[in-house]
Image (cartoon, rainbow, N blue to C red):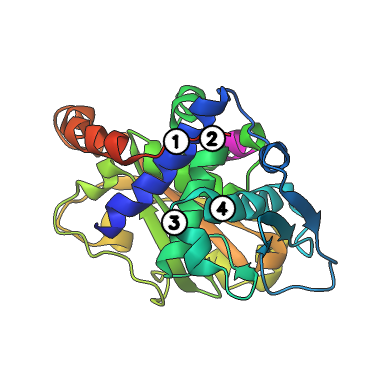
Amino acid sequence: MSRIFSLKLARQTAEAFLRDEGISTLPVDPFAIAESRDIVVQGKPAEHDGVSGMLLRHGNDFGIIFATHIPSPGFQRFSVSHELGHYFLPGHIDQVIKGGIHVSRAGFVTNDPYELEADHFAAGLLMPETPFRKAMDRFDPGLDAIGQMAELCVTSRTATAIRFAELSNAAVAVIVSTGGIIDYCFMSDAMKSLPKLDWIRKGTPLPTGTATATLAADPERVAAGDRLSDETDVRDWLGGTTYAVVSEESVGLGRYGKVLTVLSSGSIGPDGDPEDDEDDENSLLESWTPRFRR
């Protein structure tokens, strides 16, 4: 199974769970879902940091501990949803729990396939495609739209931005960086349609002269949550052969020390209807997705 397929399957598994439970509106409450499965959820003391959460097992009983050192409801809800991913996704419990405990670092910060699948399960659980698309279509793509969706879903701006890029019909790229170095990048299908892209790699420096690089060079502004916006040639970020002006919006993420960047354009995109191209893949994913029973 390909990595892309397995991650999409993880998101669809979460959405299938919501359908089976009759949950169709935003926001989704992961604490209530855990309670419905008799999973005890507790916050761990704020002075203990370094991990986002833990999944505990004692016999047939399960518990979730989530980090509180980051005082963000969105981060904490994502962490609990990540652990629910390990609980619900086929094969995860037997694989990840060693000695009755599994320690997670949620938030798309690792290449471990089980952690990434749990992250994508969490995204599908908190931001299911149908209601998320319906809500996001009210906004033009960009940081303001992502902020509105984050409030609606009670999710972090970073997780919301990634989901926004995954589901947007517009050309959108989301980049997260720390100290001027890129952590990761997610792009919408429309942005990926640009020919001969130079795919952004983890560990590479931010493009010089960009608004993001200017903001990232000032840790105080990053910590204060300042924003910078500009227009730039998409090639400055993504390379390729096509000149196109995109909006570049960046914001500091406070004590995280990270910068969130959103590139967006309404004029970039492939010809035709991308949904038609995905019909066969979605049918295959549907056949693989588990059904849940209490």
User: For mark 4, does the 10 Å Cα neighbourhood hold few (<14), some (14 to 19), or many (20 or more) residues?
Assistant: many
Q: Which residue is mark 4?
A: 87
User: For mark 2, does the 10 Å Cα neighbourhood hold few (<14), some (14 to 19), or many (20 or more) residues?
Assistant: some
Say what amino acid the circle numbered 1 marks.
Answer: Pro
Quarter of the image with the C terminus in it = top right
Label 2 near label 1: C-beta < 8 Å? yes
> Between tags 1 and 4, which lies in front?
4
The reply, left or right, for residue 233 in relation to residue 222 is left
Q: Position of residue 94 (x, y in %)?
A: 50, 64
Q: Which residue is mark 1?
A: 141
Q: Which residue is mark 2?
A: 145
> Between tags 2 and 4, which lies in front?
4
Magenta-tinted stretch: 146-150
Q: CA distance from mark 3 to mark 1?
A: 26 Å
Q: Position of residue 101 (x, y in %)?
A: 65, 70
The reply, left or right, for residue 281 in relation to residue 20 is left
Which disc is residue 117 wearing? 3
Q: Secondary structure at mark 1?
A: loop
Residue sticking out furthest to the front: 59
